[in-house]
């Protein structure tokens, strides 16, 4: 390895280290400011709680054997909804690419469905699926499937036009073009949609748990609101942020492996 390469690697590692330390400092500064503002009542401690109160609430949940139960319920529902949504999105995207007329026919309706607040369908979902985990998963699938499908379909239709003409000139069928050109060319789009899908699935799960649930992070937040336990509400939100970040990073790691 040349000296220039070593210098480049050293600077690259140093830059990553500086960014990581900077991120840690931002988080620490946020929590310190939050604690001080709450302790000296510059912000309302009842509404905004404080890091020490939140930590105590999370510790109490752990001692009561409720912490990991609620986390697991939300994570389980998110993963199920993400998997179902991904399969449906990929299947429909392939159909919409193979049958261009169908895509043109359904495009305005897909746009309308994407714009529709899925929470508005909550009462109907509860009546059809029942007041149970099925309703939560259905809500999450409805929220993630349309967005993911639109992203993947647009990726298919944005395939290099020159390469498409080249394959057509050699007599390739639409199925062969899809298999050997369109899907491989859209790897980045498909894998990037994983990150979008997991985020939308988590949003859908929490929305579903707000409507009907007996466990989960969404249940903790809505229950804390009902009994005016704002410490529990803020604790649920903080746990939700942490879990969302962990799931995002896991999907990001899978993305890197698949892209290699």
Image (tube, rainbow, N blue to C red):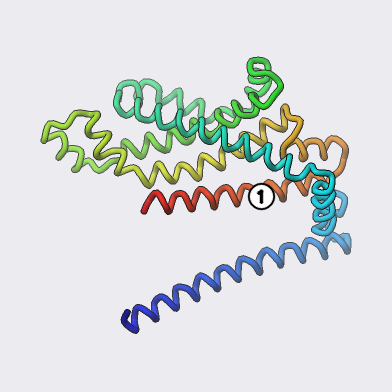
Q: How many marks?
A: 1
Q: Decide which of 248, 76 is in the foreground and name it.
A: 76
Question: For numbered disc 1, what is the local secondary structure?
Answer: helix
In the image, what residue occupies the spot 58% across and 47% down? 247
State left or right for residue 92 relative to residue 58: left
In the image, what residue occupies the spot 64% across and 24% down? 134
Q: Decide which of 218, 66 is in the foreground and name it.
A: 66
* Residue 149 picture location, percent across and down: 44, 33
Residue 26 sits in quarter: bottom right
The residue carrying mark 1 is 241
State left or right for residue 130 relative to residue 108: right
Residue 98 sits in quarter: top left
Q: Residue furthest left?
A: 170
Quarter of the N terminus within the rendering: bottom left
Q: Residues within 10 Å of mark 1 (few under 14, many from 20)?
A: few
Q: Decide which of 97, 67 is in the foreground and name it.
A: 67
Quarter of the C terminus within the rendering: bottom left
In the image, what residue occupies the spot 67% across and 33% down? 207
* Residue 242 picture location, percent across and down: 66, 51
* Residue 34 picture location, percent across and down: 78, 61
In the image, what residue occupies the spot 57% across and 33% down? 80
* Residue 184 picture location, percent across and down: 30, 42
State left or right for residue 191 relative to residue 70: left
Q: Residue furthest bottom?
A: 3
Q: Is residue 71 shown above or below 36?
A: above
Q: Residue furthest top?
A: 128
């Amino acid at each position: 390895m040349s000296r220039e390469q070593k210098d480049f690697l050293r600077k690259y590692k140093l830059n990553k280290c500086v960014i990581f330390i900077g991120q840690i400092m931002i988080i620490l500064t946020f929590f310190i400011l939050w604690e001080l503002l709450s302790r000296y009542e510059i912000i309302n401690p009842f509404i905004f709680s404080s890091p020490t109160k939140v930590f105590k609430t999370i510790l109490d949940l752990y001692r009561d054997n409720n912490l990991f139960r609620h986390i697991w319920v939300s994570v389980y529902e998110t993963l199920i909804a993400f998997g179902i949504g991904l399969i449906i999105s990929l299947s429909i995207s392939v159909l919409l690419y193979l049958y261009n007329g169908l895509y043109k026919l359904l495009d305005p309706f897909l746009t309308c469905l994407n714009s529709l607040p899925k929470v508005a369908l909550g009462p109907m979902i509860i009546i059809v699926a029942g007041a149970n985990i099925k309703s939560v998963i259905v809500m999450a699938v409805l929220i993630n499937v349309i967005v993911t499908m639109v992203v993947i379909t647009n990726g298919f239709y944005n395939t290099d036009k020159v390469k498409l003409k080249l394959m057509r000139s050699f007599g390739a069928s639409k199925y062969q073009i899809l298999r050997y050109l369109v899907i491989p060319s859209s790897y980045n789009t498909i894998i990037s949609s994983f990150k979008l899908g997991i985020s939308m699935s988590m949003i859908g799960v929490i929305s579903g748990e707000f409507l009907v649930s007996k466990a989960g992070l969404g249940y903790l937040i809505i229950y804390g609101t009902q009994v005016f336990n704002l410490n529990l509400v803020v604790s649920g939100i903080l746990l939700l942020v942490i879990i969302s970040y962990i799931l995002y990073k896991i999907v990001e790691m899978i993305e890197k492996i698949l892209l290699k």
